[in-house]
Image: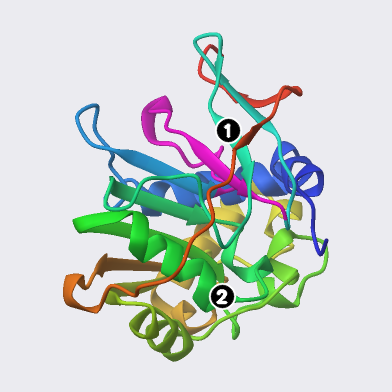
Amino acid sequence: MLYDVEKINAFYDDARGQMVAKLLREDLKDIWHPTATSSNLAVGFPFYFFPNKNICPVLMPVEIGGMALAHKHAVYSAVIDSYNWPVESDSVDYLLIAHALEFIEDKEAFLREVTRVLKSAGKIVILVPHRYGLWARSEKTPFGYGTSFSRGEMFGLLKNCGLQQEKCTRSLSLPPFADKLPDAVSNKLEKVGEHLLQLLGGVLIVEATKMVYAEPKISRVKIKAGFIKSQSAFSSSE
């Protein structure tokens, strides 16, 4: 296990992680907007990115481990086999993946499951470490572990799995040590980064849709989801 869920959660519990979560939520709010009438799913560790506490089920790959998501006295998270999701085909409208793809060994097999579960007009948003960003070089954050990606690599990977990349933007322009700086300085750095340091953005936010005609055909084995009953990592009651 390269970077387990407890370490990811601990990162977002401290000042640096809270700064990162705030910046990423801001960038996600216009592109990740599940509704009460859509079928929504998240994979990995997305707990700090949900907009307006709009909770949806979370699948957590065995590569990072599991942590409970409690909402209205129910558990909404499950640990899964990364290559065999307990989700019906063509059933998901919106899918968010965060802190997952970079830790998966067979990335194409993982993304083929994405293609399988998405509806014809389904949309996926993926957050991954940017290979040329500063955060991928910091082992004090989750972004410094696993595989980092370039825009071209993500485009090729998605295309091979029947997914059409619509947009790829860079986020997290602040350096990894920004939490040690005064707020006024950090805010100025982020604004400067939006214009001058985009090439060094620490995270790629990739938007893609399902290419219906290219859906892969793979054999599947039915599995049973293992729901987590441990301490909740995120609760909408707060």
Taking the magenta stretch, the answer to whether it contains residue 53 is yes
Q: Is residue 9 above or below residue 171?
A: above
Query: Can you tell which mark lies on residue 77?
Result: 1
Q: Is residue 128 above or below residue 85?
A: below
Who is closer to the viewer here, 191 or 161?
161
Quadrant placement of the C terminus: top right
Residue in the picture at 53% in, 11% down:
237
Answer with mark 2 or mark 1, whichever residue precedes in sequence: 1
Who is closer to the viewer here, 212 or 3?
212
| Image spot of residue 62 (x, y percent) | 71, 52
Task: Determine whether label 2 and label 1 are within 8 Å by CB.
Answer: no
Query: Can you tell which mark lies on residue 107?
Result: 2
Residue 210 visible in image: yes
Colour scheme employed for the rendering of this structure: rainbow
Marks 2 and 1, how far apart at CA: 22 Å
Give the side of residue 59 with respect to residue 147, left or right.
Answer: left
Please state the extent of the stretch shown in magenta in the rendering: 44-62
Q: Quadrant of residue 235?
A: top right
Going by the numbered disc 2, the residue's amino acid type is: Lys
Q: Quadrant of residue 117?
A: bottom left
| Image spot of residue 144 (x, y percent) | 74, 70
Helix, strand or loop at label 1? It is strand
Residue in the picture at 24% in, 78% down:
214
Q: Is residue 154 above or below residue 3?
A: below
Helix, strand or loop at label 2? It is helix
Taking the magenta stretch, the answer to whether it contains residue 52 is yes
| Image spot of residue 53 (x, y percent) | 43, 26
Residue in the picture at 70% in, 34% down:
67
